[in-house]
Amino acid sequence: MSQQGSLIGRIALVTGSGSGIGKAVAERFAIEGARVIIADRDATAARETAERIGDSARAVVMDIADEQSVVDAFAELTAADLAPNVVVANAGVQLFGSDAPIADLELDTWRRTIDVNLTGTFLTVKHAVRSMLTTGGGSIILTGSPTGINGEGRDFTAYSSSKAGIHGLGRAVAAAYAEQNIRVNTVVPGYTETPLVTAISSDREARAAITSRIPLGRPGTPADVCGAMVFLAGDDAAFATGALFTVDGGMTTL
């Protein structure tokens, strides 16, 4: 349901918006009146999403695990008078087939996951804050996971740990920069069917097993996440910071 242009006047950067949740959020932000920046390490995917949205979108290449790439992207936007006042740190990975319980987890898998999910979010937020300190503040939204709250991801040690770290990062940054009018919140989607989780969604038994643990009885879709993101990006959430907003079909109630 549209919130009737609630993001008019916003410039919103969404990482990982070449596909999945990020793409859906960027498209919804544009519908709500925002100018959207499609940030993705995949230049082709970023360009295609921007073209799909139209004139209110601009593509920028950003590899969140590479600080220079993040710096360059923010500098490009600032030079174009497009410094964002909304940043959604959404990009991430889940390494199915190699992430595992800790006794079986290889250090390389741990490092690759932490480098993208936690360090990449850190770098995105770091440079978002630096930009917002010069422009009067804004809203930063992180993408968390139920696996960072309960034992839902017990077989995915690296991913679960990275998401728990993101939750803690959001609270720390929210407390540190509230006086500078920078709000930081974390949206926690449950099992959401995107290209990231094809290993589950394409396996009938695995999909049924995880769906059975969702009280609302179905997987999430990227569209399910968009409303919470729109709320947190806009003025209706002016008094919300440092919070976790679960959009998980009730997974974290169990």
Image (spheres, rainbow, N blue to C red):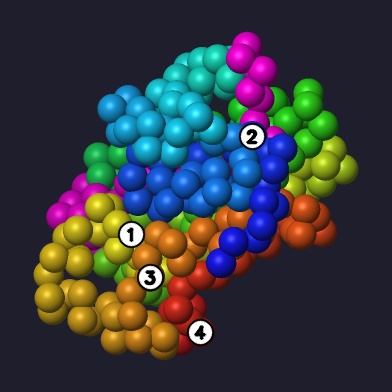
- Dot label at residue 11: 2
For the record, the magenta segment spans: 78-107
Q: Earlier in the sequence, mark 3 or mark 2?
A: 2
Left or right: residue 120 compared with residue 48: right
- Dot label at residue 253: 4
Disc 2 crowd rating (10 Å Cα; few below 14, some 14-19, many 20+) is many
Left or right: residue 185 compared with residue 48: right
* Residue located beneath label 1 in the image: 157
Tags 3 and 1 touching, CB below 8 Å: no
Left or right: residue 64 compared with residue 198: right
Q: Earlier in the sequence, mark 3 or mark 1?
A: 1
Q: Earlier in the sequence, mark 1 or mark 4?
A: 1
Does the stretch in magenta take in 90? Answer: yes
Indicate the amino acid at tag 1.
Thr
Q: CA distance from mark 1 to mark 4?
A: 21 Å
Residue 187 seen anywhere in this rendered image of the structure: no
Of discs 1 and 2, which sits in the foreground?
A: 2
Count the marks: how many? 4
